[in-house]
Amino acid sequence: MRRGFFILCCMLPSLSPLLAQDYPRQSIDLDLLVQELFAEQDDESISYEDLYETLFQYYQRPVNLNRTTPEELASLYLLSRPQIVAFFNYLQENGELLSIYELQAVPGFDLATIYRLLPFVQVPDAGLQSDARPLWQRMVGEDNNALILRYERTLQQRRGYTSVDSTSRSTTRYLGSPEKLYLRYRISHARDYSFGITAEKDAGEQFTWSPSTRRYGFDFYTLHLQLYNKGRFKTIALGDYQLQFGQGLLLSSGYSVGKGGETITTVSRPNLGVRPYSSVLEYAFMRGGAVTYTLGKVDVTAFYSNKRVDANLQFQLDTLDREEKFFTGIQTSGFHRTPTELANKDAVREQVYGGSAQYRSADKTLSLGVTALGTHYNATIRKAGAPYQRFEFGGTHNYNLGTNYSHTWQNVYLFGETAMSKSGGLGSINGLIANLARNVELSMLYRYYARDFHTFYGSAFGEGTRNINEQGFYTGIKIKPLPKWEITAYYDRFRFPWLRYLVDAPSHGDEYLVRLYFRPNRQSSLYAQMRHESKGRNLSGNTTAMDYVAQAERRNYLLYFETSPTRTLNLKSRVQFGTYAQESPQQTGYFISQDVNFTFSKLRLSTRYALFDTDSYDTRQYAYERDVLYAFSIPAFSGRGTRFYTLLQLRPLRDLDVWLKYGLTHYRDQQSIGSGLETIEGPRRSDVKVQVRYRF
């Protein structure tokens, strides 16, 4: 009775702007949410598209709060681990939620947090919890069922598509047309099933049927089928899939966030297990089968992957005059445009196999796990022999064994993972997240990756793009001094005990960021941010065999303002400024943009005009752009010029959506753009992109 009275009181005043469980759901600006998570968008190793797609899937099919798991809530990156534990403690003490308004009663949930969470969660009626119909009948009636076709092209002719010039030393040209084509079909229902196929042809690749070169129309295909919660089988996956256990030290899917303006929720990784793969990155996935079986409080996963990867395969005779195959490393660009790139396509077979056991206590505060896997190639990996490659992996087999843990004690969340590779190299990452007060959160993390620690599918928290040859300590804080204000900051100090690519000596560095965020009302937001990074790097222009390493200092400043004065009009203003120095005069760069966006019932128009001016590529400026659905655009701007784009989204029919995008970049004092086969003669580059989605 008292609980029902509380819910009634909540429904009357404080959450009147909120969406009730039975009211029409408001649209969510995923662009802004992703920008907040990636406030410093200059890390090309992060799979932004995977994050965007995952959030969009949750928006289409909201999480059932009465059936969710801690890792599913963590994958939203909207709740801290202490908040997640508080939520499940509330369920344990009070039973299932009766209304979405009841979130106000969960300790540690403020209105700002609930507002951000609402588009992705729901509390459905008790009678709608299950569907006992056969799978094919459930799929026929599924509304999350769509086909997407995309076409994009650069209008100016690039050198790779011109005729061979007899006076030029370069005789290589692209084999295919300049169009980029994309096809995607997916049908899914949360916690039930997911089926999808994605196909892509990059610009310059041929659209052809050639089994001898493993090309069947499109250049790349990915296909998956996953079933969930079939008796004791938690997950059954066939085709292409991803794995993420622990902190991602051994197995990490593309869905992870690095250092940015969000300094708390993105530090630890959600333990998601087996996930579907539908991206077009042509290397970061498993191909085969995986299954997760529940034994009480333990989830046991077994997996096997067998796929081909791109590599420059070479041959030589060994001491017994036998032919030996070897390659220097896996090529990850995914391009097969020239005869050389095509010859490297699918040249090496890779097999990955292993298993994982994950235990979770009944109160969901303790998690323990162990993971083992092996990796085998049908040719030998042999590095070129550069000094920085001395401790890199070599051979055909690698084995890994690791353990992971997480534990919540009162307002402190502890987590970590430690693993070893066949070489004996050790990798370890450990951290904590704590709610020091109602308005103060703290995160701390230490990582150690030995110079001979080898993992091919790991992507744990770190400064480098791979978890090798690195030590570091990260501290992040989030303070909410007033209801509409938020201050986030982090400091990360790291060192690299051995040489690295373009760093011919052991090196060190540090990085810090401070962001001040102000949201005066639900229609407006403003944040200012400053980031500084110091990192060792070879000094340019050095003529000695071993380059001299000096600290490179990079500073970036960002001011962002967004407001929606009316329901149809949205304005975004952005000012960026950066500096770079390395024992030489300081270089600078800036980027200024203004977005004007209109939203009507069946039409959405987004436009931007921007100016940029940088002294060099070292002061390049990254700026997020709106794009068609399931595409993510964060171009880098260097040189001097202007940028304009317009994106039109319309719905001519109830089940049909159309996107049209045109972008133009004009460079001043520049007679060509790009280099090599990507060179455009002239100061302009314009791109068009057309996408249609039909929902069955």
Image (cartoon, grey):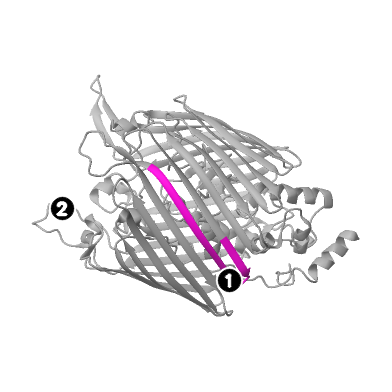
Q: Closer to us: mark 2 or mark 1?
A: 1
Mark before the other along the chain sequence, 2 or 1: 2
User: Which quadrant of the view contains residue 666?
Assistant: bottom left
User: Which quadrant of the view contains residue 372?
Assistant: top right
Q: Which residues are magenta?
A: 517-535
Q: Please give the residue where the numbered disc 2 appears in the rendered image.
A: 170
Marks 2/1 in contact by CB < 8 Å: the verdict is: no
Cα gap from disc 2 to disc 1, whole angstroms? 53 Å
- Residue 104 in the image: state x and y as whole percent: 76, 60
Along the line of sight, the residue nearer the viewer: 26 or 290 = 26
- Secondary structure category for the residue under label 1: strand
In screen coordinates, is 203 left or right of 601? left
- Residue 274 in the image: state x and y as whole percent: 57, 45
Report crowding for label 2: few under 14, some 14 to 19, many 20 or more residues within 10 A (C-alpha). Answer: few
Res. 691 in view: yes
Image mark for residue 524: 1
Q: Main secondary structure of the magenta part?
A: strand
The amino acid type of the residue labelled 1 equals Ser
Along the line of sight, the residue nearer the viewer: 461 or 159 = 461
| Residue drawn at 54 percent across, 69 percent down | 695
Along the line of sight, the residue nearer the viewer: 483 or 359 = 483
Which residue in the rendered view is the most extreme toward the top?
A: 320
Along the line of sight, the residue nearer the viewer: 456 or 315 = 456
| Residue drawn at 45 percent across, 43 percent down | 510
- Secondary structure category for the residue under label 2: loop
